[in-house]
């Protein structure tokens, strides 16, 4: 495998700070040295490489954008985005693990939790000593989270939770699940459900063609008693879980760039080295047209992600801005992965090459954290002022 040097056609490194470049290069080296040698086998076996958890914790990648007072790295939005970019160059499953841990488990504890909850959970989660997951999606309620049927009923100093969640990354290996449920007054509350709590289970979902190097689970809650001290006191309503999703979608928009760059890098070297009809594949017009398209779309996505990061840094980013980036960048990455698979010919369907693995993974990324069509409607409502959801 060739040494990965990234793609910076428009010299975007000139826009990055020293801290941002250091975060990117640290993650790039980690992915090249520790992830790439094992990820293909992990994907084929359908197993998440759990040995990487402590390593990403030691490198400060878990909750990297949260404050140092809770044991986190305290990085800015662009540095965090670049970490996600490089992790997804390795595999969407690894970036998903880091995203869920940091943006969907640690972030709600930080943003909505009590000081006691923050001090109890965040430092150990930052080190990878404790794992979290996020329970919002249900078997019959994906794009319409407000229709959830999981209920939380107050019983003295406890809450009793009943329901089920589906498609939960990290669920089976999680020490704590951030579970969202409706109370008797139909308000939505978040609860920290700890592993081992009676009535709580997290069976793993197998037989996946996508995100095979990732743990995907169901959460089952049967009369699960949770103390009120485990309720997130700082938020009520859908704005709670949707705020978490905005954080996660931001990292995903960067991650797609990494997957696209991996596919571009692989197919560039392949077509320059493979000869057909007495000359390199890269000398043919159709191959060059594809490569030019890849460079163009990746560069556009890089600019979108960088600008979104600067808006986030300035406190000006809106959820709709994040929807645009997630929608654009993941479609771009999936298109490029499919194109790369085709350019590799029959070799593209073998595990020796990574483009089909990225292609299969991106089919899930295209769907989760808001489907492509849902983000289309979010943007449509934003620019017209008219909701198409109802």
Image (cartoon, rainbow, N blue to C red):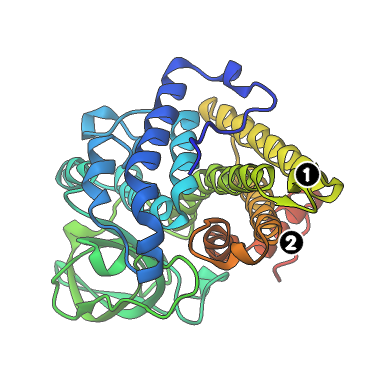
At x 46%, y 81%, the residue is: 139
- Residue underneath mark 1: 293
Helix, strand or loop for disc 1: helix
The numbered mark, 1 or 2, whose residue comes first in the sequence reads 1
Few, some or many residues within 10 Å of mark 2 (<14, 14–19, 20+): few
Q: Going by the image, does 301 lie left or right of 262?
A: right
- Disc number for residue 387: 2
Q: Is label 1 in contact with label 2 (beta carbons under 8 Å)?
A: no
Alpha carbons under labels 1 and 2: distance apart: 34 Å
Q: Going by the image, does 7 lie left or right of 1?
A: right
Considering only vertical position in the picture, is 354 above or below 299?
Answer: below
* Residue 51: % across, % down: 23, 53
* Number of the front mark, 1 or 2: 1
Q: Going by the image, does 117 lie left or right of 49?
A: left
- Name which quarter of the figure residue 149 lies in: bottom left
Q: Nearer the viewer, residue 340 or 325?
A: 340
Helix, strand or loop for disc 2: loop
* Residue 352: % across, % down: 49, 59
């Amino acid at each position: 495998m060739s040494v990965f040097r990234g793609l910076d056609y428009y010299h975007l490194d000139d826009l990055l700070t020293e801290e941002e470049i250091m975060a990117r290069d640290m993650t790039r080296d980690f992915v090249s040295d520790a992830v790439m040698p094992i990820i293909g086998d992990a994907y084929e076996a359908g197993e998440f490489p759990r040995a990487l958890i402590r390593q990403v914790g030691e490198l400060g990648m878990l909750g990297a954008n949260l404050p140092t007072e809770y044991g986190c790295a305290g990085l800015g939005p662009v540095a965090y985005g670049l970490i996600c970019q490089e992790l997804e160059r390795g595999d969407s499953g690894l970036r998903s693990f880091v995203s869920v841990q940091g943006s969907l488990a640690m972030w709600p504890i930080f943003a909505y939790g009590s000081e006691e909850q923050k001090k109890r959970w965040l430092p150990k989660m930052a080190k990878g000593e404790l794992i979290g997951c996020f329970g919002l999606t249900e078997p019959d309620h994906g794009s319409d989270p407000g229709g959830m049927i999981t209920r939380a009923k107050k019983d003295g100093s406890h809450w009793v939770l009943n329901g089920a969640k589906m498609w939960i990354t990290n669920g089976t290996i999680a020490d704590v699940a951030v579970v969202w449920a409706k109370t008797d007054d139909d308000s939505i509350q978040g609860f920290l459900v700890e592993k081992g709590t009676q009535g709580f289970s997290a069976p793993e979902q197998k037989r996946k063609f996508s995100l095979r190097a990732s743990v995907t689970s169901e959460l089952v809650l049967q009369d699960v008693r949770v103390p009120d001290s485990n309720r997130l006191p700082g938020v009520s309503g859908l704005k709670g879980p949707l705020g978490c999703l905005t954080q996660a979608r931001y990292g995903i928009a960067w991650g797609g760039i990494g997957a696209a760059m991996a596919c571009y890098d692989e197919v560039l070297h392949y077509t320059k080295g493979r000869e057909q009809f007495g000359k390199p594949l890269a000398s043919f017009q159709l191959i060059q047209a594809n490569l030019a398209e890849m460079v163009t779309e990746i560069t556009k996505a890089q600019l979108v992600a960088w600008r979104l990061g600067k808006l986030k840094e300035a406190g000006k980013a809106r959820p709709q801005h994040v929807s645009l980036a997630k929608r654009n960048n993941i479609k771009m990455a999936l298109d490029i992965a499919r194109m790369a698979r085709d350019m590799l010919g029959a070799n593209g369907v073998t595990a020796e090459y990574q483009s089909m693995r990225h292609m299969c993974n991106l089919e899930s990324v295209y769907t989760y954290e808001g489907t492509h069509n849902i983000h289309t409607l979010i943007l449509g409502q934003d620019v017209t002022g008219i909701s198409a959801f109802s």
